[in-house]
Image (cartoon, rainbow, N blue to C red):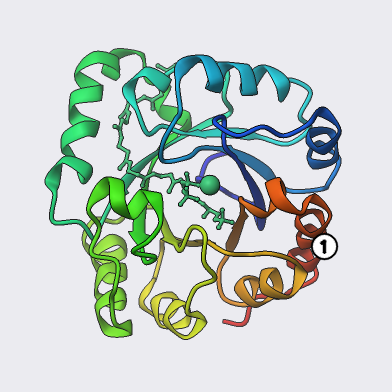
Amino acid sequence: MTEPMEGWRHVFKLDPDRELGRRELDAVLGSGTDAILVGGSSGLTYDNTAALLEQLASAPMPVALEVTRPELAMPGFDAYLVPIVLNTPDGGWITGRQARALEEWGGLVPWDKTWAEGYLILNPDCEAAKVSGAEASLTELQAAAYARLADRLLRLPLLYVEYSGRFGDMALLRRVKRALSGARLVYGGGIDGPERAAEAARIATTVVVGNVLYVDPAAALATVAAVRETVPAD
Ligand SMILES: CC(C)=CCC/C(C)=C/CC/C(C)=C/CC/C(C)=C/CC/C(C)=C/CC/C(C)=C/CC/C(C)=C/COP(=O)(O)OP(=O)(O)O
Ligand SMILES: O=P(O)(O)OC[C@@H](O)CO
Ligand SMILES: [Mg+2]
């Protein structure tokens, strides 16, 4: 991977703090998804993350870790993504915690497979918004301004529009897309089956499916084909 998420249209996000049966996990591994992202905004520990990594040992697709705590730094993943929350007034979640973690891990980070992930958190009720104090109720204009900031000023490789737990505003997502020139647009939140997956895939380059896997695995698995069959409208 020379660019982050290169070739990833559909991604399943697995949360080490939640249980997925072996049968469901095998179905994910055989689903044809482009990648697995291991992440969550609370309850992640070294032990539960290492255990999930072990369960994913036979994955035929890349397995990446969203590094949300310093103690999750561990070898064995194909890629590491470090979140930066763009829309929080609390600098601790923009660069503070990341810099402190790099004091400890900086010399060991595999930089050729590590990237920053600019997060625009837009569901005020999601855990990530609460944890990071994100100002998540944004107008289209405000969201597009953050997109330009990420893309043009900070030149981040990824912009992750995050509605975790709720399906987002697709008109806003389209506006964000138009504001980007180089950053890859990643969308996640509230995809509960193929229809919403296709809607998001018409706009975003990468579509992330999380919670539904734990409540309705069949609906989750059906999102893979839906995303693959959808051509993004530019
Ligand atoms: C081998 C080796 C040393 C590997 C190195 C790995 C590495 C790159 C280490 C670098 C160290 C480093 C920089 C670590 C970062 C530490 C850190 C504290 C970063 C801050 C992360 C951050 C901004 C978190 C805020 C919350 C957030 C944006 C989380 C992203 C994931 C997310 C939104 C998950 C969804 O959560 P979920 O639980 O599903 O939400 P719901 O409950 O609402 O559904
Ligand atoms: O869990 P859902 O709502 O599918 O969201 C996926 C992902 O964006 C969470 O970080
Ligand atoms: Mg989740």
Disc 1, SS: helix
Disc 1 C-beta below 8 A from ligand 2: no
- Binning the other alpha carbons within 10 Å of mark 1 as few (below 14), some (14 to 19) or many (20 upward) gives some
Of residues 32 and 134, which is closer to you in this image? 134
Classify 200 as above or below 78: below
- Numbered label tally: 1
Quadrant that contains the N terminus: top right
Tell me: 79 left or right of 63: left
* Residue at the spot 67% in from the left edge and 17% down from the top edge: 54
Check disc 1 and report the residue beneath it. 225
Residue 50 location, x and y as percent? 56, 17
Q: Nearer the viewer, residue 6 or 20?
A: 20
Q: Would you identify the image quadrant in which residue 105 lies?
A: top left
Q: Position of residue 149 (x, y in %)?
A: 23, 65
Residue ID at (44%, 75%): 177
- The quarter of the picture where residue 207 lies is bottom right
For residue 223, side relative to residue 201 (left or right) = right
Q: Is residue 5 left or right of residue 138?
A: right
Instruction: Name above or below for residue 91 compared with residue 58.
Output: below
Residue 174 in the image, given as x and y percentages of width and height: 47, 81
Residue plotted at (28% across, 70% down): 148
Which residue is located at x 38 percent, y 61 percent?
Answer: 125
* Three-letter code for the amino acid on which mark 1 is drawn: Ala
Residue 13: x percent and y percent? 60, 44
User: In the figure, 6 relative to 38: above or below?
Assistant: below
Quadrant where the image shows the C terminus: bottom right
Answer with left or right where residue 229 lies relative to residue 153: right
